[in-house]
Image: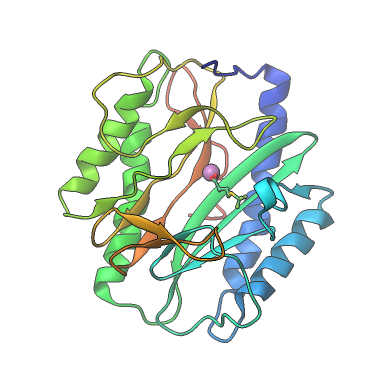
Amino acid sequence: MSISIKSKREIEMMRESCKLLEQVFAQMRDALKPGISTKEIDSLGEKLIRKCGCTPNFLNYNGYPASICVSVNDEVVHGIPTKDRIIQDGDIVSLDAGLIYKGYHSDMARTYGVGKISEEARLLIERTRQSFFEGIKVATEGAHLFDMSNAIDEYISQFGYGIVRDLVGHGIGTKLHEDPQIPNFSQKRRGPKLQAGMTLAVEPMINIGRGDVAWLDDDWTVVTEDGSLSAHYENTILITDGEPEILTFNGICE
Ligand code: MF3
Ligand code: CO
C-alpha cells in the first residue's frame, strides 16, 4: 500500500476542488424539501458541478449511473436518484457528492432531516457528525491511521449504534479512491503512520440498529439489514503537523 503525499501545488488544487464542492453541496441542501424527487437533486448537483467547469466524479464510476448519491432513511449510501422517489416530511436524507477540478477529486456527505424528524433520528445525525470530529482529533502527523478508526468506534459505541463495516473511508487525490482504506471501527493493528500532505476522505456510516448492511437489486443502494435509520458524514481532510485541515468544511456546510 502506498499513500500519496500531495505537493504544495496539489494541495492548492485539492483545496479549490473541495471549496467548489462545498458550494455546490449547499445549494443541493437548500433544495432538499418535501416534494422534490431524488432525481431532481441529482440533476441540480450535476448542473452546478458542470457550471463551475468541473466534472462529477461519481458519474459512471464503476458504472454508477448518476452524479450524486441520495440515500433516504434506511438507505446507508449509494442511493440511485430516480424521478419516482419523492422526499417526504420526516425523512432523513444523506447526500453524497464529489467533483474533479483540474484533475483533483473532492468528496463529501451529509445527512439532513427534512421537516419534522424524530428525536432518535436527530440524535443519530448529530452523533454521526460528532464521530467524524472525534476521529480527526487524533489525525495528526506521526499518529497512526487506525487511531482515527479507534476514536470513531469508541465514541459511537457508547450509544449502542451499529457501525457499518462493509464500507470504509479512503485516500483521495488524482483518483476518487486511493490508499489507504479507513475503517470506522476499531482495529487491532495501528495502521500506517500519518504524514503531512496526505488527503483523506473520512466518512463514518452509522445505523441506529445493527451495523449489517444489504444491497438492493439495483446492485448499488446499500440499506441497513434490520431496516433501521442510517446516517453518513464525510469530509475530505488534509493531514498537517497540527490539526488536520478540513477541506470540505469552510463554514458553508456544517
Ligand atoms: N462518496 C462515495 C465514496 O466514498 C463515492 C460514491 S461511489 C459512486 O466513496 F460510485 F457512487 F460514485
Ligand atoms: Co468517500
- Rendering coords of residue 76 (x, y %): 43, 59
Q: Is residue 37 left or right of residue 174?
A: left
Check the image and report above or below for 147 versus 24: above
Q: Measured along the vertical axis of the image, is residue 76 above or below residue 241?
A: below
| Whether residue 58 can be seen here | no
Residue positioned 81% across, 52% down in the render: 52
Q: Quadrant of residue 101?
A: top right
Q: Which residue does the image show at 66% across and 80% down from the upper left?
A: 83
Farthest-out residue, front: 217
Question: What is the x, y in percent for residue 221?
Answer: 51, 62
What kind of colouring is applied to the model shown?
rainbow
How many marks the image carries: the answer is: 0
Quadrant hosting residue 67: bottom right
Left/right of residue 52 with respect to residue 67 in the rendered view: right
For residue 148, above or below residue 4: below
Q: Is residue 92 visible?
A: yes
- Residue 196 is left or right of residue 141, and the answer is right
At a point 65% along the width and 30% down the height, the residue shown is 173
- Image x and y of residue 22, in percent: 62, 51
Residue 108 vs 87, above or below: the answer is above
Where residue 13 sits in the image (x, y, percent)? Answer: 72, 31
Q: Out of 114 and 62, give the one closest to the viewer.
A: 62
Name the residue at 54% across, 22% down.
198
